[in-house]
Image: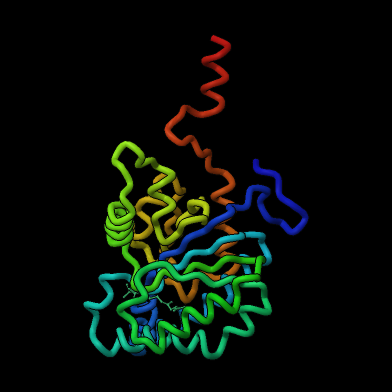
Amino acid sequence: MEPTNPAGLPEHIPTHVAIIMDGNGRWALARGLPRLAGHRAGTENLRRIIEACIEFGVHYLTIYAFSTENWGRPQEEVQGLLHILEDVIDRELQELSDQGVQLHHIGRLDRLDPTLQKKVLHAIEYTRENNRLVLNVAFNYGGRDEIVYAIQHMIKDGVQPENVTDEMVSQYLFTAGVPDPDMIIRTSGELRGSNFLIWQGAYSEWYFTPTYWPDFDKEQFRLALEEFSHRERRYGHVSETEGDLAQHA
Ligand code: FPP
């Protein structure tokens, strides 16, 4: 059994947690509310999970807020999600900064309107000295798009094929400098990766829960961390105990 620290937390807290915040629409539907009400409830929940990350000692949190495919949703929902991003920056930037949150964006900013682009860049600049939690907001993000973008930039920079390494590719991604996610959580019972961190998640531990994102509270998050601490990460090797047995055989 994994030892726990005095706060009742598992000893091995992941450095980087990434979350696919799924189920907002179904959460709203179940209450007879419009889908956007689900996204607003999801945004409220994000606040709780940010606080929990700070409390539990998670240093990086990456959230999938809007994918490159989400432009295909009804216009009203797309506009609503863009508005939520703007609203979060307008209303919450100071509080997030006071909490020690450093904001980053991953994905392509260029499809957002110039005013919103400026706000995002300002929020990143405003929080760059903070160091309690790095919050990567994936907005207009797609894992394949990110890899295509990286390849285009490597070619533009004249990188020779024989010099392309695993580490170099990582440095050309939007997440350059950020450690790979230790754990990726997907709420709402869907069992897919949906084009999220497909390079960075190569060895991440996945955690799936049927809970819709607005209901995925601090206690459920703690349970996810506990489950993570019981996982043995083998990175393609054999388990430690098997390795020991083999050595002594
Ligand atoms: C997936 O649920 C959720 C999204 C596509 C949006 C998630 C966005 C937020 C929680 C807002 C936070 C945003 C920012 C900018 C900080 P779904 O709509 O696919 O749910 P469903 O599968 O039940 O329909």
Q: Could you tell me residue 211's position as x and y percent?
A: 44, 67
Q: Could you tell me residue 85's position as x and y percent?
A: 44, 83
Whether residue 32 is visible here, answered yes or no, is: no
Q: Is residue 144 left or right of residue 51?
A: left
Q: Could you tell me residue 173's position as x and y percent?
A: 39, 57
Q: Nearer the viewer, residue 158 or 194?
A: 158
Please report the residue visible at 61 percent of the width from the left and 60 percent of the height from the top: 59
State which quarter of the image contains the C terminus. top right
Q: Quadrant of ligand 1?
A: bottom left
78 above or below 143?
A: below
Q: Could you tell me residue 190's position as x and y percent?
A: 33, 62
Q: Nearer the viewer, residue 211 or 51?
A: 51
Extreme residue toward the front, this view? 158
Which quadrant of the figure has residue 93? bottom right
Please report the residue visible at 44 percent of the width from the left and 84 percent of the height from the top: 118
Q: Is residue 226 left or right of residue 120?
A: right
Q: Is residue 50 left or right of residue 192?
A: right
Whether residue 10 is visible here, answered yes or no, is: yes
68 above or below 82?
A: above
Which quadrant of the figure has residue 84? bottom left
Which quadrant of the figure has residue 29? bottom left
Please report the residue visible at 54 percent of the width from the left and 56 percent of the height from the top: 16
State which quarter of the image contains the N terminus. top right
Q: How many circles with numbers are drawn on the protein?
A: 0
- Colouring convention used in this rendered image of the protein: rainbow
